[in-house]
Amino acid sequence: MKRKEEFIQLLADQIRCKRAREDVVREIEAHISDQAQEYEAEGMTPEEALAEAVEQMGDPVAVGVELDRIHRPRMDWGMIVMAVLLSLGGLAVQCAIGNITVGSAAFERQCLFMGIGFCLMLGICFLDYSFIGKYAKPLFILYAAGVLFYMTQFSYTVNGMHRGAILPLYLFVPLYAGILYQYRKTGYAGLIKSIGFLIPPLWLSWVWIPSLSTAIQLFLICGGMLLFAVAKGWFSVKRKQTILALILVGVILPLVGGAAGFAFWLADYQKMRILAFLNRGAYADGAGYYYQQIADVLSRVNWIGGAANAEEIVSQTARGEVSLFSLVALYGSLVGFLVVFAISAMVIHAFLISMKQRNQLGLMVGMGCTMVLGVQTVIGTAVNFGCLPITTVTIPFLTGGGTAAIVYSILIGLLLSVSRNRDVLSDRLYRPKWRLRLERTEGTKMTGE
């Protein structure tokens, strides 16, 4: 036994990353125990089997050095470079379509937002994202209270909507990943509680902002994460039946909610936008005029070079929500395609990184952040080209403003943290220290009894 302890201690001393050390030691101890059991089955005494298992592990220093090389943080420089280039490209787009002018106060302010966002992104990258798994519930509740307090005390409305609070609601997504992780292996009770945690962000987006499109997007993102968790067997429930039931509810609820929202909650101008989208010809002189303009401009856009006389229309519509349409109208379809392709490439890169995570918390956090970026890109692009009703959208990197820069920097920072720690954190259930002490105390009492 002493020989084993000495081996483990020497090996652990070679692991420089403290967060990886505990998991590595656990894996080595399990391997030694399994090997010792095999030797016992061959006829050795327990002492001889353990000594032989330790001996077969080799030189503890050499093994520890090799494990230290493997289990260490790895910076994803590719994603950092893509984030920087896309941020600069987004700034160039804002200048190209006339939203801001080089040297103006707006340009300087946007550069400041980009700098703050980049620093925030790197700072979060160096954090241990497992704190989300440890403190998901209190963080979720505190953040919900903070958003509500902000909307009631500081936020102002534009056309009856708290537009400044829309993007911050998407930060519920990584927190919801932690909620799902905490309810692993808790059966149907944990599944129902996880569904219950969907209510606060949906309620805030639907009732308080109010924004039906934001509520639908959050529902799709968090609902997709919940389905993925069930499919991966996180809740220890009947997978096929549960997934089918969730999909049925997920289809019925949005339909019922959308109908109820249209009937009771949406403002008249919001209802008019939906009606104009569904029947553009009947509203061509009113709310449907925008869709007619889009169709007219796009029919005249060249692959290289914008549509003739598009400047006047763009000057009337140039704002954050339609920045991509303005870019295509002025400079051609190829430019718009390259911009969407560049953003999509980063989203796909982030998705692939997330799917390769061995750590289940990292998998869910990365998946949630990627889904936010992906959904915002798809819906934003669709709204820009008239494929969805006009609504407030923010395409990553193309939308200006401090809120967009900060929120997307946080999401990308979490993705970088997940990627950086892919060889550091293993798949284990993260709990606050007070809960670990309580569980150990209860375990000791049970052993004593």
Image (tube, rainbow, N blue to C red):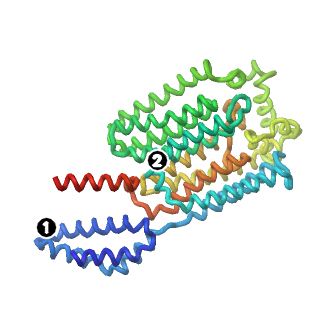
Badge 2 marks a residue whose secondary structure is helix
Pick the residue in front: 50 or 134.
134
Residue 41's disc number: 1
Residue 355 in view (yes/no)? no
| Residue 383 image offset from top left, x and y in percent | 69, 35
Residue 389 found in image quarter: top right
Assess whether mark 2 and mark 1 are in contact (beta carbons under 8 angstroms): no
Nearest the viewer among 112 and 66 is 112
> Which mark identifies residue 310?
none
Mark 1 falls on what kind of element?
Answer: helix
The front one of 361 and 445 is 445
Say what amino acid the circle numbered 2 marks: Ala
Tell me how many marks there are.
Answer: 2
Q: Which residue is mark 2?
A: 136
What residue lies at 43% left-to-right and 44% top-to-bottom?
Answer: 180
Position above or below: 164 against 285: below
Decide if residue 253 is in sight here: yes
Q: Residue at x 30, y 52 (%)?
A: 439
Give the camera-side residue of 284 and 216: 216
* Residue 28 image offset from top left, x and y in percent: 31, 69
Mark 1 and mark 2: Cα distance apart in space:
45 Å
* Residue 168 percent across, percent down from the top left: 62, 43
Q: Residue at x 75, y 56 (%)?
A: 112
- Indicate the position of residue 333 as horizontal and vertical percent values: 76, 45
